[in-house]
Each structure stands twice: as structure tokens, then as C-alpha cells.
């Protein structure tokens, strides 16, 4: 047999073997998929985790869509935990450890986790792993500060969405604990006495575009915002400084509102959501709840039958053919941008 023919056969067999090893949940996104996670409960609130695709229907603005991707509950989930370790979060660091420990406890054996922290710089604390013991050993690093004095929130989220998820395949989610106070907003306000509008905030627009393009849901646990203000008792607090620098001014309040609204937009365009713990102690159960929700969810994906990018809000509704089931969606719609 000629050498070239033998090499061709070996290459084909190798390709076929590798293809056979690829799990059926691998998804390469080359078209504008819209994804939504759904949990299903039966009578008495029992979680239903073994439904097939044909029992689901998905509608956009009342028009039924073709389900192009279906991830059953058993499909592994890859969850990246990102923590704000800047000075303004210093009094939350111990709670970060407890939150991660609770989150890990709710992960399933097939799920993978990665952990990173950010302040002025980004630091990976744990690469992708399903090893629960290895994940727990990474927890002490969450309370070791790097550079107190800056917060590159937008850059950290942008990096994770662009680079860290390229290392894995399957269902993906980013969970961020932060107050959302990127230093770029604060510096602009302090140097020019003005709050940047969202449209002219270049670092923010960059991460917003990335979140929209990557289609990885971003779940934000946001604290110390204008909706759950609890002034930092240990490290720096930008809001408190602004009150001193701009007395009898609305700028400090507008700053908090602008930070919060940017986070809401980020969660929305990515298909995730944002929650506001009322107390610091609420952070731990919120992480546990996210872990349970992810571990019991189906993922549905479709390509809209209305491809126009007209900026309109498109309402998403997932239904089950069995009317006795109660469905909870991760998102109720999206803006066509």
C-alpha cells in the first residue's frame, strides 16, 4: 500500500475516533443563537430533570421558534466564578470564601469550575477543574489582596468572556460578585466633574459588546449599589469620597445609579440576571441558589425568525406541553441589537 494512502487512512481513522469522543453537548456558535435556561417543577414543587426536547416549545413575541439546541439537565455546566477583590469590597472577602464553599457543595460531579479575582489586575486562582478538593484549596487566595487602589471590573469580565471559556466546551456561565465600581467611571468623575454617559463610556461599551457577542450568561451578585447600599467599613469607598468632594450635589447618587444600570445592561445582553443581596449574609445563600438553579436547568437555543437588528425588545416564552409543569426562565426577553 502506498505511503500516502496509508497516511490518509490513519488520518481518517484518527479523525473518526476523535469525533466519536466529542460529547454530544459540544456547541460551536457560528450563528446568532438566543439561549435561555429553564427549570421545571411538577406537583408540590418537585424538580423535573428528565424531560426530552419535544416536550418544550419556545416563542418569541408570540411566534413559535424552532429549537436548534437542547441541553438536558444532565449536561455538564462550566461555571467561572469571578470575585471583586478591590479595596471597596474588603469587608466582604471572608464571605467570598463561604459563598464559594457553598457553591462547590451544590455542584454535580460532571460540572467544572474555575475561579479568578480582580482589582487593578486579574489573577487566576483556579483553572478549570471538576476536582472539588482542588477547588476548596483555592479558597484562601480569595482574601489575599493584590493591588488595593483600583478596580478593572470591565476588563476582568471582558477577559473571562473572551479568553477563559475558549478552553472548554459545553454549557457555560459566568458568576460575578462585585459592586460594579470600575475605576474608569470614578476617575472621569473626579478629574472632569462629570459622569460619563453609557454611550461614551468606551471600556463599558467594549465589555457590553463582548457579552452580546459571546452569548455566555453573566450572573451578577451586586452589593453596595443604590438599591442595597451598605457603606464599606474597612477599605476605600468611592461613594463616601464623592459625598465629601461634592457636598450638596446629586453626583454621588448619580454615580451609584450609573454603576448599577451598567451592570443591569451587562446581565441583560448576556442572557443572565442580576440580584441585590439586602444584607451581606444573603450572599452565601444566593450562591447556593445559583448552584442549584444551574444544576437543575435545561438549556434551549434558537435562531430568531426575525433577524432584523432593530433594537426592539423581543419577549421570550418557554412552554411545556404538559400544562401541569411550572417553568422558570433565566431570561424573559432580549433587545435585538
Image: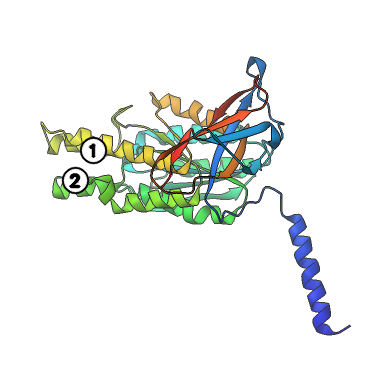
Circles 2 and 1: CB atoms closer than 8 Å: yes
Judged from this view, the residue extending furthest toward the left is 248
For residue 52, above or below residue 326: below
Query: At numbered mark 2, what does the secondary structure look like: helix, strand or loop?
Result: helix
The image shows a total of numbered marks equal to: 2
The dot on residue 94 is none
**Mark identifier at residue 255:** 1
Q: For the N terminus, give its image quadrant.
A: bottom right
- Residue 25 appears in view: yes
Residue 165 in percent (x, y) is at 54, 52
Q: Is residue 67 left or right of residue 195?
A: right
Q: Residue at x 50, y 26 (%)?
A: 285
Q: Secondary structure at mark 1?
A: helix
Q: Nearer the viewer, residue 151 or 275?
A: 275
Residue that sits furthest to the top in the current view: 44
- Disc ID at residue 189: 2
Q: Is residue 202 above or below residue 106?
A: below
Q: Residue at x 14, y 49 (%)?
A: 192
- Residue at left 45%, top 29%? 283
Q: Is residue 149 visible?
A: no
Q: Nearer the viewer, residue 257 or 314?
A: 314
Amino acid at each position: 500500500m502506498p505511503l500516502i494512502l496509508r497516511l490518509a487512512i490513519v488520518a481518517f481513522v484518527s479523525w473518526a475516533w476523535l469525533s466519536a469522543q466529542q460529547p454530544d453537548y459540544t456547541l460551536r456558535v457560528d450563528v446568532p443563537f438566543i439561549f435561555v435556561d429553564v427549570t421545571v417543577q411538577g406537583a408540590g414543587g418537585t424538580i423535573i430533570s428528565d424531560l426530552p426536547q419535544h416536550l418544550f416549545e419556545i416563542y418569541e413575541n408570540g411566534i413559535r421558534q424552532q429549537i436548534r439546541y437542547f441541553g438536558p439537565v444532565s449536561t455538564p455546566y462550566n461555571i467561572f466564578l469571578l470575585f471583586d477583590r478591590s479595596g471597596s469590597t474588603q469587608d466582604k472577602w471572608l464571605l467570598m470564601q463561604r459563598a464559594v464553599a457553598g457553591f462547590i457543595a451544590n455542584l454535580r460531579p460532571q460540572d467544572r469550575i474555575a475561579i479568578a479575582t480582580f482589582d487593578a489586575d486579574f489573577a487566576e486562582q483556579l483553572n478549570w477543574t471538576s476536582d472539588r478538593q482542588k477547588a476548596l484549596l483555592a479558597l484562601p487566595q480569595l482574601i489575599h489582596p493584590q493591588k488595593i487602589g483600583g478596580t478593572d471590573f470591565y476588563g476582568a469580565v471582558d477577559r473571562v468572556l473572551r479568553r477563559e471559556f475558549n478552553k472548554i466546551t459545553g454549557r457555560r456561565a459566568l458568576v460575578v460578585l462585585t459592586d460594579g465600581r470600575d475605576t474608569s467611571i470614578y476617575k472621569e468623575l473626579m478629574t472632569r466633574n462629570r459622569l460619563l454617559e453609557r454611550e461614551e463610556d468606551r471600556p463599558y461599551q467594549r465589555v457590553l459588546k463582548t457579552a452580546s457577542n459571546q452569548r455566555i450568561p453573566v450572573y451578577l451578585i451586586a452589593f453596595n449599589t443604590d438599591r442595597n447600599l451598605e457603606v464599606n467599613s474597612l477599605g476605600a469607598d468611592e461613594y463616601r469620597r464623592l459625598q465629601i468632594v461634592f457636598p450638596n450635589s446629586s453626583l454621588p447618587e448619580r454615580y451609584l445609579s450609573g454603576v448599577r444600570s451598567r451592570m443591569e445592561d451587562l446581565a441583560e445582553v448576556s442572557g443572565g440576571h442580576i440580584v441585590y443581596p439586602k444584607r451581606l449574609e444573603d450572599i452565601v445563600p444566593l450562591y447556593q441558589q445559583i448552584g442549584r438553579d444551574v444544576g437543575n436547568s435545561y438549556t434551549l437555543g434558537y435562531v430568531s425568525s426575525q433577524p432584523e437588528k432593530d433594537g426592539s425588545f423581543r419577549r421570550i416564552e418557554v412552554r411545556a406541553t404538559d400544562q401541569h409543569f411550572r417553568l422558570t426562565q433565566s431570561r424573559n426577553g432580549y433587545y435585538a441589537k
